[in-house]
Image (cartoon, coloured by chain):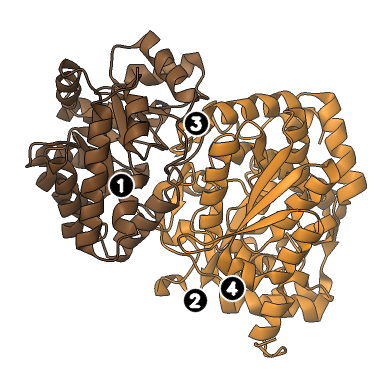
Chain colours: A brown, B orange
Amino acid sequence: MSRIGVAFDKARADGRAVLVGCMPAGFPTVEGSIAAMKAMVDEGVDVIEVEIPYSDPVMDGPVIQKASDIALAGGVRTADTLRVIEAVAATGAQVVTMTYWNPIEQYGVDAFARDLAAAGGTGLITPDLIPDEADEWLAASEAYGLDRTFLVSPSSTDARLRMTVEHCRGFVYATAIMGVTGARAQTSAAAPVLVSRVREVTDLPVGVGLGVGTGAQAGTVAGYADGVIVGSALVRCVLDAPDQAAGLAALRALSAELAEGVRNPAR
Amino acid sequence: MSADAAAPAGRLPDAAGHFGRFGGRFVPEALVAALDELDVAYRKAMTDEDFLAEFDALLRDYAGTPSLLYEARRFSARAGARILLKREDLNHTGAHKVRNVLGQALLTKRMGKRRVIAETGAGQHGVATATAAALFDLECVVYMGEVDTERQALNVARMRMLGATVVPVTTGSRTLKDAMNEAMRDWVANVDTTHYLIGTAAGPHPFPELVRDFVRGIGEEARRQCLDLTGALPDAVAACVGGGSNALGIFHAFVPDTGVRLYGFEAGGEGVETGRHAASITGGRAGVLHGTRTYVLQDEDGQTIESHSISAGLDYPGVGPEHAWLHDSGRATYLPVDDDEAMAAFELLCRTEGIIPAIESAHALAGALKIAPRLAAELGREPVIVVNLSGRGDKDVHTAGGYFGILDKEQ
């Protein structure tokens, strides 16, 4: 049974989409990131996506790159990320971890899975690990009952889409656009098509990420997807703020706006 | 290259791009379709006589290959070995890299794409890509770390003259690895129209195999030329290794010749023990970087560590996965050469042969000087060593002039 599926089941029962909010661990500090994530939970973010900062984040746009650089310059370690996950999971929110593959490989795939499960994490989103290379993670996630979210893209062929979805557990991450993370002015026309392609091959919930930054956009995406994933726009609240209090205030306001958005799906 | 030469010597990688435990694809799903498309186009091209004939003609008439194998007698006397230089420095654009860019530009045309992007460190691959883009009338964007655009202003000017757009990369350490990240991000967003013309035998499958195959003519030529010149195969082949395309290019034809020792010389920078180096095999650990599993300079948590070398072209914290495999299998030996050793060999070649080598290639020369006495002792005679002189040193005059105190460092 999927751990994160609980959040999707609950939202489905409420007739709305799940709101997933992303924040790098250790940004701007370890404690600061915990405070930010708790603030997001308070304002109605259902699932916190904790990103492990990485030196070479090829799927991330400038905002998350900058935040990751700040976290790494501050000396954040993989073990700190686990501490962040534990603190946020203790609030009762669902926590999923987004990570490039090398930090996990260096920690030890089995060891990380064990420690992630112990910290209360639900599973991993792996932007640069495709099922083709994931044997070790498939085994470790089975052993510790963790969810596996692989990405599907508008460019995925039908065969690859089916294969990728078959290896997912928990939810499927549909990348709305061909590109990297970062808020966009308009939501994607490719995303609804991709979501319906995923629905043809699975009953798993589908989350849509990349480019969503406002409550109205969240409402649009909630109209066709089970989950709305927001990253850069939330991170920017903290990044652009003159001090921590202002950052948290902006983060709370946007979280609340997005939470409202997923409750008012455009149909 | 002829169709029969297209049969791979080592039968590696496997269909998914693995060289033993190395290689593969660690990329966003968004890129998989493009990598598959490239793989199909490349495999078709390598058995297509028209493609191979067009590639051969370009290499001959435009790039000026086969490059000479030159016996460096005065350098040999100092080395205590018979040193044969594979003169890739005489190719158009001044390095082996022209072979790779011509091959990939031809493939780009075949795939119907109109735009190429590339990463560059010192600017050599950027210049080579801009050259091929001009020849094939392709739009060209080159990503270059901001630090490197300042260090290598002349190459930035060259690329712009050739019609390319140079984008300074201001993220991360603002060097080659970040330029590669930015090129990958561009590719994810523009994959329908764009080919990522990667500059070395690294990155996700099929790049390591494809780049190797486009440059493996170096070794095929050298093997034949050495047989013609000496009547025998060499005792050793030496090359510098950054990402490692020139080394694979010269090694590949010799891999089945088990009597031929293969030596790759990594950039030891200020010394591997100082931590300021670019020797990924000697001083790194297996990990994942830029789409492939290979040896990587990284900290305990898997964060990439910045590399250091006097040679901008070797200044990369990873290495092509086939080298990682050649190292693990024991078929090739990888040793570090530090900045000072490389510069001593650089000076020696200038003074004995009247050839200014690229500082990259000077690492291979220094390595040959290092292994010559050992080989002579082991063989009981003067060894024959083929050294890949992968590039010319014009681009390095500023660095070398500063190092030797010939130029005012402020100039």
For residue A88, side relative to residue B206 (left or right): left
**Mark whose residue sits in front, 4 or 3:** 3
Circle 3 sits on which residue?
B30
Q: Chain of mark 4?
A: B
For disc 2, the marked residue is B270
**Which of the 4 quarters of the picture holds residue B313?**
bottom right
* Pointer 4 with pointer 1, Cβ within 8 A: no
The residue sitting at 85% across, 53% down in the picture is B67
Where the N terminus of chain A falls, by quadrant?
Answer: top left
Q: Cβ–Cβ below 8 Å for labels 4 and 3?
A: no
Give the quarter of the image for residue B40: top right
How far apart in space, not on screen, are marks 1 and 3 (Cα)? Answer: 24 Å
Query: What is the distance, in whole Å, between disc 4 and disc 3 at their CAs?
Result: 36 Å
The percent coordinates of residue A97 (x first, y second) are: 25, 39
Identify residue for label 4. Answer: B310
Q: Nearer the viewer's eye, disc 4 or disc 1?
A: 1
